Image: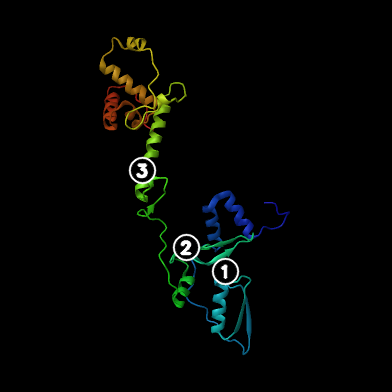
């Protein structure tokens, strides 16, 4: 933030805080400065003592300007509002079917919403602690609607997805999260089983146990020969411990690779420890 030795403005300071620390740091800074704290509004201002014939000019017909003009008029002032735009409300406004809006570049948008539908290009909601605004909404009889930020039961529809049929968001979300979890498990398993760090299609094992490609042929005789002379119990113990070591102590991953339950894995490891056999610590 190059300011040439000048003291930064409040906006420049907050912008720098947001760029470095993100929205959480920005909100905390604004709260400390008194800009994001809960309002201390207890009621409209008690204005009185207007001189006869006194007049006031209010610049801007946003919410602040309109409410200032309202209270000043109640106090006996003659008020005139000057507004640059062709509408009141400032950045608070709504677009409905039949409205038109001309952008700064000259392009004109015509709103084709169905009756009852609308869009708020400015603020979308009124937080519960904005007591001043809520007070005046009640005083002027402004109808308010609940703002539903998240709805698990809403419909999702795309002609190119789900066979062209609408589905509930909760169903699509469950499928998505489940598919991502299966993908994570498959890739985790492939990384653990890859002997040389290269993951080929034969290393991808799907949730149903099938593979994307047949495993590469291996020469089995030397491996089998190394097992001759050992008991099944000894071979099983070596397989469990080496798989667990390959999984860096992750009991769940090792159990999935071996095709046994986590409970069985824990019981086996408990028996190993009781027999004085070293076991990789859990991660």
Q: Quadrant of the C terminus?
A: top left
Marks 3 and 1, how far apart at CA: 43 Å
Question: According to the image, label 3 marks what residue?
Answer: 175
Question: According to the image, label 2 marks what residue?
Answer: 113
For label 1, the crowd category at 10 Å Cα-Cα, with few meaning under 14, some 14 to 19 and many 20 or more, is some
Q: Earlier in the sequence, mark 2 or mark 1?
A: 1
Provide the secondary structure element on which disc 1 rests: loop
Colour option used:
rainbow
Question: According to the image, label 1 marks what residue?
Answer: 90
Left or right, 12 with respect to 148, comes to right
Looking at the rendered structure, which numbered label has been put on residue 278? none
State the residue in front, 61 or 134.
Answer: 61
Q: Is residue 135 above or below residue 36?
A: below
Q: Are marks 3 and 1 in contact (CB under 8 Å)?
A: no
Q: Position of residue 237 (x, y in %)?
A: 30, 20
Q: Position of residue 176 (x, y in %)?
A: 39, 43
Q: Is residue 79 above or below residue 235?
A: below
Q: Is residue 122 above or below residue 23?
A: below
Provide the secondary structure element on which disc 2 rests: loop
From the image, state whether disc 2 or disc 1 is nearer to you: 2
Q: Position of residue 25 (x, y in %)?
A: 54, 53
Q: Position of residue 276 (x, y in %)?
A: 30, 22
Marks 2 and 1, how far apart at CA: 22 Å
Provide the secondary structure element on which disc 3 rests: helix
State the residue in front, 44 or 126.
Answer: 126
Q: Earlier in the sequence, mark 3 or mark 2?
A: 2
Q: Residue at x 44, y 63 (%)?
A: 114
Q: Earlier in the sequence, mark 3 or mark 1?
A: 1
For label 2, the crowd category at 10 Å Cα-Cα, with few meaning under 14, some 14 to 19 and many 20 or more, is some
Total numbered labels placed on residues in the image: 3
């Amino acid at each position: 933030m190059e300011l040439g030795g000048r003291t930064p403005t409040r906006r420049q300071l907050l912008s720098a805080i947001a760029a470095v620390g993100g929205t959480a740091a920005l909100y905390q800074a604004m709260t400390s400065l008194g800009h994001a704290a809960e309002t201390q509004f207890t009621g409209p201002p008690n204005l009185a003592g207007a001189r006869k014939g006194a007049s006031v000019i209010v610049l801007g017909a946003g919410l602040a300007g309109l409410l200032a003009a309202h209270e000043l008029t109640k106090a006996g002032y003659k008020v005139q509002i000057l507004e640059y735009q062709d509408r009141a409300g400032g950045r608070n406004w709504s677009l409905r079917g039949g409205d038109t809006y001309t952008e700064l570049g000259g392009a004109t948008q015509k709103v084709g919403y169905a009756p009852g539908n609308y869009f708020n290009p400015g603020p979308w909601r009124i937080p519960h602690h904005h007591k001043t605004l809520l007070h005046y909404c009640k005083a002027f009889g402004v109808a308010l609607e609940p703002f539903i930020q998240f709805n698990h039961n809403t419909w999702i529809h795309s002609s190119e997805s789900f066979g062209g049929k609408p589905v509930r968001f909760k169903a699509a979300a469950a499928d998505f999260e489940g598919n991502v979890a299966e993908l994570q498990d498959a890739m985790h398993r492939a990384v653990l089983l890859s002997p040389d760090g290269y993951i080929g299609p034969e290393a991808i094992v799907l949730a149903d146990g099938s593979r994307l490609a047949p495993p590469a042929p291996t020469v089995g005789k030397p491996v089998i020969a190394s097992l001759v002379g050992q008991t099944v119990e000894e071979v099983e113990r070596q397989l469990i411990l080496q798989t667990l070591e390959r999984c860096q102590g992750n009991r769940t991953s090792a159990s999935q690779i071996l095709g046994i339950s986590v409970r069985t894995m824990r019981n086996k490891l408990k028996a190993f420890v009781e027999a004085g056999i070293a076991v990789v610590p859990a991660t």
